[in-house]
Image (tube, coloured by chain):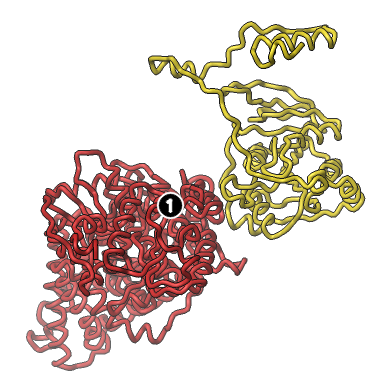
Amino acid sequence: MLNLVLPLLIGVALLLAVIGAVRRIRLWRNGRPSPVALMAGLAAMPRRYLVDLHHVVGRDKYISNTHVATAGGFVLAAVLAILVHGLQLDSRILAWGLLLATAVMFCGAVFVARRRIDPPARLSKGPWMRLPKSLLAFASGFFLLTLPVAGLVPAQLGGMLVGLLLLALVIWGLGELFFGMTWGGPMKHAFAGALHLAFHRRPERFGGGRSTGLKPLNLDDSNAPLGVEKPADFTWNQLLGFDACVQCGRCEAMCPAFAAGQPLNPKKLIQDMVVGLAGGNDAAYAGSPYPGKAVGEHQGNPFSAIIAREGQGLVDAETLWSCTTCRACVEECPMMIEHVDAIVDMRRHLTLERGQTPNKGAEVIENLIATDNPNGFDPQSRMHWAADLALPVLAEVKRTDVLLWLGDGAFDMRNQRSLRALVKLLRAANVDFAVLGNEERDSGDVARRLGDEATFQSLAKRNIATLDQYSFRSIVTCDPHSFHVLKNEYGDLGGQYVVYHHTTYLNQLRQVGKLQFSQYKGGRVTYHDPCYLGRYNGEYQAPRDLLAAAGVTVVEMERSGFRSRCCGGGGGAPITDIPGQQRIPDMRMADIRETGADLVAVGCPQCTAMLEGVVEPRAEVLDIAEILANALQESEVHS
Amino acid sequence: MLPDSTARIAVLLSVGQHPLTARPRRADQDARALELALQLPGVEVLPVHAGELNDQNETALRSYLGMGASALKLLPAAEGEDVLPLLQQGLRDLQPDLVLCGKRAEHGESSGLMPYLLAQSLGWPVISGLVEIERLEAGHATVLQALPRGQRRRLRVTLPAVLAMDDAAPAARQSAFGPARRGVLEVEQMVAVAEQGLANLNNLSVLNWQFQPARKRPKRLKIIKATSARDRFKAAAAKAESSGGQVLQGLTPDAAAETILKMLREEGVMNSTHGD
């Protein structure tokens, strides 16, 4: 009897899976076109899965080992089950292989089940609680059914009742793992995830690469949508990426806005996008909600607005504006989903089409348009801080080795101290440098992250035109936001430059012996990694090397390096200022306090401002340039 | 105007100038006028600009469209040309129930006379310092006028009328790039009037005036003797006290002049010996 039923069952399950897959693919294809190398992507997929994805999953050894056993066992078991039971190939070797695969899968599934006994808050419940049982059912069902094929037990053992029991297990397993994979069950992550890896919008991220610059909008094409209004405005591979989410909640655990009680949870946002692409409401979502927002009140479909103009849409605008674009979620996502891209895409629609940038957003954008700086200062006063420094200006000297990019910190009295320290260091190392002076404009970072792509491109193009007039080898800046934009985002608009963050550049000077420092004699010091230097550009080492050279032993915070927690100052978050339970910089200062540090070294004007905004008593906040300028050896100053 | 027809509100929009960088922008008061019009329920908003159309001006004009108006009627005028005849004719053609405008242009002659001259030439009433339109009904509007120190005066005006905005009116909404790009600038040539406008070409170009940034008038120093926060607040918020004033009515011009001179001498503005 089993010989007749099993092929039928497997055949039906496979057929349904194929139908489901076609339906799902059609949903993704509602998105806008996006050119990808289809065959090359598919060919690269196994490596992306086995190396790049597991590199991220492997940060949690428990689950990475569990996943290897379960997923590896399942893939092998599925193939062999189709051969042995579906096609009834009578081969002892295949049957033994199937026994081994299901056994490995069973062991993995046991560990999945153990994680689910008292799951951490970040994990979604609901159907995900069912998954380990389904895995066990699939593995045990096929294991037992294969025993007779392998010749270990006589074929007729057990009789009718046992046969039916085994069939029930197998139906359950097939239902979850074959049918559920393409019809929206938890196993959807395997199907969508594999294709997502193959057709990723940023293939540069694989193989150890980095791709963090936002993608430009084509403003010359008046028919192209300005950002994303409805789910179908995403590119098809972005929609596919949302579908790959495993709801592991690692993003949620890292998100500073979520921790601060602001109405954002990256996992929920991605799940809402899945609701949007498939149509329906979020009532079935079984994870942590957006803080302060009930689940089940939002709905959407591929062709209706994500942020409703009236009434309740798929997502509320303040959810999008809570994001600091710190990229902690993207860094942590084992599925390599691009949360920040999606958020900025939706912000673009709100700003460019609706003019709904909240709070100070409109004012900042207006200032950027009228005065080229976010606070509306007179652009002719950009160099007032350096009135006594006699800095060479490029308009006069025309060529230089290093172009010192000041950033809008030039208007800020706190940051002017860091700038003066940096100038002192550059002079001590006899660097040939010059500034743009009043010709410099805001880099466009804030405008772009507030969704105003038009103002960003206008600023960027004018900056590029200015830079084109002069000859320089590299740009050095103490602002990681300008650094990132100049280095990674001006390229799309025709500006290719060698750009260094000041810590990287100073470290190079130190390595060739042009800078020497006396030994630091103060108290404990910790270092706060700026998001736009670390996660966006991978520079974790130079600041630490510099501090070590100055005799500083850095006491690391629990969350440092690629897991550094945002100061709350990125992405225009201080401008849109969405209320939460606590402030992000306060939480970061609590991290600093835990190390017992008296001094926190930073490398970003924004971080300095945010951390110094925390009420005292707290650690002193100094830019690395300031610490080094203080430690500069006297002989160097006069040389 | 029929009681049930939609009110037509013409909004006069000029090209403004940023105080620090002198870049063309939407004029602040004009943008407030458009904001006010856009917030009124069930009215037809007719944005109008009279002036030169060039690349820089176009960006500024389009930023009005970015606030949500779908089209802007443009009455072309040469640089320096008097726009009054153009606006007068343009408004006669439009037949609006209300004309909203800023009270003073951000560059050029910037005399603040435009609303008055326009109202005079159309024979309509004019109200300055507008902050809110409370009610629109057939033939009448109830509006709020701003007075110094946050006071408001409710006025009922016969339509059609010219209303000039106050700086205290609600701030203009954000201008969005997409609607600004899509909005239509409807150019309407008015040959007959344009000739007239060119005939009395603006004094500015004839007289060859020189322009320089305006400086704020110096303020009389106010010495605050208050010792408590409450007193300081009262001093800051109090109405300017006018004591000892007198209302002069039915005097001959000579007698009136004599009284004014007397007051000026008392105040020490005029030298008492010199005056005689």
Per the rendering, the colour in which chain A appears is red
For the point 62% across and 22% down, the residue is B152
> As shown in the figure, which amino acid type bears the numbered disc 1?
Val
**Quarter-of-image position of residue A18:** bottom left
In the picture provided, is A367 more to the left or to the right than A46? right
Residue A64 spot, x, y in % from top left: 17, 71
In the picture provided, is B158 more to the left or to the right than A630? right
Along the line of sight, the residue nearer the viewer: A561 or A183:
A561
Query: How many numbered marks have been drawn onto this rendered protein structure?
Result: 1
Answer above or below: position of A440 versus A573: below
Query: Judging from the image, what is the letter of the chain drawn in yellow?
Result: B
Answer above or below: position of A384 versus A199: above
Along the line of sight, the residue nearer the viewer: A132 or A219:
A219
For the point 43% across and 15% down, the residue is B225
Residue A469 spot, x, y in % from top left: 52, 71
Along the line of sight, the residue nearer the viewer: B215 or A465:
B215
Residue A562 appears in the rendering? no
Answer above or below: position of B268 versus A291: above
For the point 30% across and 64% down, the residue is A426
Residue A498 spot, x, y in % from top left: 38, 74
Q: Which residue is mark 1?
A: A315
Q: Secondary structure at mark 1?
A: loop
For the point 64% across and 39% down, the residue is B29
Along the line of sight, the residue nearer the viewer: A30 or B60:
B60
Q: Residue furthest front?
A: B273
Q: Quadrant of the N terminus of chain A?
A: bottom left
Residue B63 spot, x, y in % from top left: 63, 52
The crowd level at tag 1 (other Cα within 10 Å; few <14, some 14-19, many 20+) is: many
Residue A347 appears in the rendering? yes
Chain letter of disc 1 in the image: A
Answer above or below: position of A179 versus B31: below
Q: Quadrant of the C terminus of chain A?
A: bottom left
